Amino acid sequence: MDNKEKKELQLLANDMRKDVINEVYSAQSGHPGGSLSICDTLAYLYSKVMKIDPKNPKWEDRDRFVLSKGHTCPALYAALAEMGYFPKEELLGFRKYGRMLQGHPDMKGIPGVDMSSGSLGQGISAAVGMALAAKLAGKDYRVYTVLGDGEIEEGQVWEAAMCAHHNNLSNLTAIVDNNGLQIDGDIEDVAGPYPIPEKFEAFGWKVILADAHDFDSLEAAFNEALAEKEKPTVIIQKSVKGKGVSFMENSAGWHGKAPNEEQYNTAMADLEAVRKGLEA
């Protein structure tokens, strides 16, 4: 990846992080920490990987995306708005009564959302069904799903993983956002899902490791996933919860809390400093 392309992606991801902060601050509700940790991934996925058409969100041959950790929808909405599925002004209606952008993804009311999600563990199950449907119909679209590392404590995740391997769903790629924290603290202290790579390997998946905040690493990971023709793939990406906002980084307390005015201003200043650094 050349430096120009990388800078464009970094700027896009940074704009998405600003969108996330604006959404959660405007609503005074939401989940900023895990949203910020996946902005680079969604920026790369939507702009460089997936076959999509924002002008035709229901295009039959599009690639599908399922946000299994549905509470981090501010990042998904940011990606969709930046891609042109709906005006960015809609982001300020996040979680407001009568507005389009719900507190969890709603496939019936939001252009570009392929699956309603939020009950943890169920998104990957839906993604498995989509990938199986593509195989049965002889379609070549791919399915991507993002899970939280805390989410994989759900037993349903492993039922879905077993089904995906059994049906040779090589058109399915899961991304585990391994930021190490969930609502109750460190994932090791809550339920201990490690070792994550070995668990997926035992279920017959191809495992790829990546740095969630390095676009060269993400490019290599997604290219490797696309090259796999026999197994479902999982990209386990090491990430920073609250990435880009100084006081939110690596803090479980920002799993599901909105900033006050002072914190909002600090967050936006942090992200504006990142932009200026990239543009220098």
Image (cartoon, grey):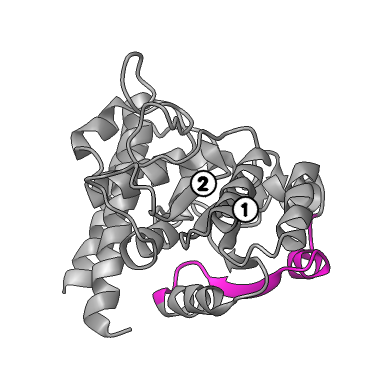
- Is residue 262 among what the camera can see? no
**What residue lies at 57% left-to-right and 62% top-to-bottom?**
173
- The reply to whether callout 2 and callout 1 are in contact (CB within 8 Å) is no
- Where on the picture, by quarter, is residue 29? top left
The N terminus appears in which quarter of the rendering? bottom left
Expressed as whole percent of the image width and height from the top left, the position of residue 194 reads: 79, 61
252 part of magenta stretch: no
Q: Nearer the viewer, residue 179 or 224?
A: 224
Amino acid carrying mark 1 in the image: Leu
Left-right relation of 66 to 74: right
Left-right relation of 250 to 232: left
Q: Is residue 215 above or below residue 165?
A: below
Expressed as whole percent of the image width and height from the top left, the position of residue 77 reads: 36, 41
The residue that disc 1 covers is 132
Q: Nearer the viewer, mark 2 or mark 1?
A: 1
Q: Is residue 23 above or below residue 209?
A: above
211 part of magenta stretch: yes
- Is residue 136 among what the camera can see? yes
The residue that disc 2 covers is 66
Expressed as whole percent of the image width and height from the top left, the position of residue 134 reads: 54, 54
The C terminus appears in which quarter of the rendering? bottom left
- Where on the picture, by quarter, is residue 91? top left
Label 2 packing within 10 angstroms: few (<14), some (14-19), many (20+): many
Left-right relation of 198 to 29: right
**What residue lies at 29% left-to-right and 76% top-to-bottom?**
6
Q: Nearer the viewer, residue 59 or 254?
A: 59
- State how far apart marks 2 and 1 are (Cα): 14 Å
Q: Sequence-wise, which precedes: disc 2 or disc 1? A: 2
The part of the chain drawn in magenta is 193-215
Q: Is residue 172 above or below residue 147?
A: below
Label 1 packing within 10 angstroms: few (<14), some (14-19), many (20+): many
